[in-house]
Amino acid sequence: MCNKLPYSNPRIDPCMRELCKAINTTDLKTLASCCGHGTYPPTIVVKRAGRIFEFYSGITLGPRKRNRYYKRDKNGFYYIPEVMEEIILSEKICQVCKKPFDDFYFIERTTMHIDLVRKYLKKIRDNHTICIDREIIKQEMIIHDLTKFQEPELTPYVWITLKYRDNLPNSSFTAEQQLQMQHATEHHVKQNKHHPEYWTSQTDTINFIDRDKPKSLVDATKMPLTYVACMVADWMAVAEERRTNPFEWAKNNINIRWEFTKIQEDLIYKLLETHWRRKE
């Protein structure tokens, strides 16, 4: 998220620009957007084949004069009334943790994660020219994790995100939900090149008892170095979010969860040494 712009300012919030650019390469056209600035969920108004709707929630919106879909609250922050009404009407309480169980937390958290990944990808792009394809890095800054906003990943990843937030046991979800979460995760790692699983023919590679622990050694030796760099950016983003140490993650997973070559391993640690400020 970023500082809010003046009302009716035609510019796009800086943290939303790359995502809007990516959306406009599809059959969607963006009409308006706001990151929410930590007060409201991020929203993007899009149009497809005559239908106008909010991108994240799928809520249909009618046409507006001059594309004015947002209202301003008393503190100067902007929101889409239809989206906020849906939040209020659809909010459910998890019976295990007694906290809101809705997909808008997923949107906020995933958008924040993507912003952090882009921050680290930009650092890598601007500081490494040897063995790194800058055009691929630029592309990854646009498309990172966008598959999570589409089925078959969207609904299960809402549950997965809440599972992490509230440290929920698997028993909090039905057998059908757990199965969908498994399939969504497998789909995600096989569709996104910053995951080592994309580069192997192995299947059934995710430990669904503990998603942060290895199930079996995955052969990542064919992963190109530029995508290894994208993976490291993802690791650093998660570490910043969780306030953990990516060096520990690397130590606990390199050649334990994922098999890497010596060249790949050297690059991983070089990137971490360069771009991760060690915590005191």
Image (cartoon, rainbow, N blue to C red):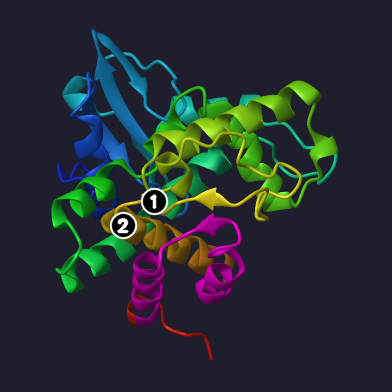
| Boundaries of the magenta span | 245-273
Q: Is residue 70 visible?
A: yes
Residue behind mark 2: 118
Q: Is residue 92 left or right of residue 81?
A: right
209 or 115: nearer the viewer: 209
Mark 2 lies on a secondary structure that is helix
Disc 2 marks which amino acid?
A: Arg
Residue at coordinates 48% horizontally, 43% vertically from top-left? Answer: 197
220 or 270: nearer the viewer: 220
- Where is residue 141 drawn, in percent x and y? 27, 50
Residue at coordinates 52% horizontally, 69% vertically from top-left? Answer: 250
- Where is residue 88 drawn, in percent x and y? 61, 30
Circles 2 and 1: CB atoms closer than 8 Å: yes
How many marks overall?
A: 2
264 or 209: nearer the viewer: 264
Q: Is residue 233 magenta?
A: no
Residue 114's tag is 1
- Where is residue 258 drawn, in percent x and y? 53, 56
Residue at coordinates 38% horizontally, 62% vertically from top-left? Answer: 233
The N terminus - image quarter? bottom left
